[in-house]
Amino acid sequence: MPDPTRGVRNNNPFNLIFTDEEWEGKTERDPGIEDTFERFDSPEAGIRAGAINVLTQYSKGYDTLATLLERLTPSETNPTESYIKYVSDRMNIDPNEKLNLTEPMTLRGLSSAIIGFENANHAYEDELLDGALSRALEYHITTKNTGGPVTQPLYDDKKYII
């Protein structure tokens, strides 16, 4: 089995760079362990933080794959064009198509693709991913005042209140 990626080791599969942001589940900075990226106490906390970061940029008007990923992964430090192509191919959408990230399945598709690109195609179990994304949407809706609670089916047999 290959060694886990940095994002998986840090429970930070979106590879959020260390900031003063007080993320839920964020662990204390220790440059001896990690000097660039945030670390979280669980994968769920890291996925939630990454999804909140994505939703925050989306709410600022970065509402296509191309504009969102250019914002999140500036080409000075990332292979942005390859990133956009990878995510676009995984989601099977045009990079310039407007996204609706308040729709849980769209956020799920985007998050899975970002996690895959950042972590050598690593994938998390559906239950963990869906729980973290549901909590991120709930946080975004209640703190960013983007609308009231929404009930959207993630699967035909389950409903999540977000």
Image (tube, rainbow, N blue to C red):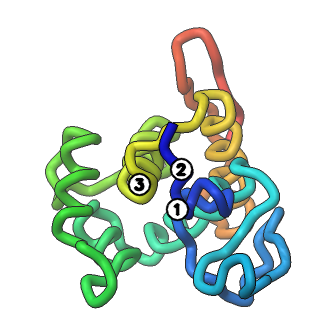
Vertical placement of residue 109 versus 10, above or below? above
Name the image quarter holding the C terminus: top right
Residue 161 image-quadrant placement: top right
Residue 53 image-quadrant placement: bottom right
Residue at image point 22% right, 50% down:
88
Residue at image point 52% right, 56% down:
5
* Cα distance in 3D space between marks 2 and 3: 19 Å
Identify the secondary structure beneath mark 1. loop
Residue at image point 16% right, 60% down:
96
Q: Residue 68: horizontal and vertical position, in percent?
A: 34, 69
Q: Residue 105: horizontal and vertical position, in percent?
A: 46, 36
Q: Amino acid at mark 1?
A: Phe
Could you say which is closer to the camera, residue 29 or residue 93? Answer: 29
Q: Amino acid at mark 2?
A: Asp
- Tell me which label, 2 or 3, sits earlier in the chain: 2
On the picture, is 4 further left or further right than 86?
Answer: right
- Tell me which label, 2 or 1, sits earlier in the chain: 2
Vertical placement of residue 123 versus 23, above or below? above
Q: Are marks 1 and 3 in contact (CB under 8 Å)?
A: yes
Task: Report the residue marked by disc 3.
Answer: 114
Task: Report the residue marked by disc 2.
Answer: 3
Q: Residues within 10 Å of mark 1 (few under 14, many from 20)?
A: many
* Cα distance in 3D space between marks 2 and 1: 18 Å
Q: Residue 117: horizontal and vertical position, in percent?
A: 36, 54
Disc number lying in front (2 or 1): 2
Residue at image point 74% right, 56% down:
45
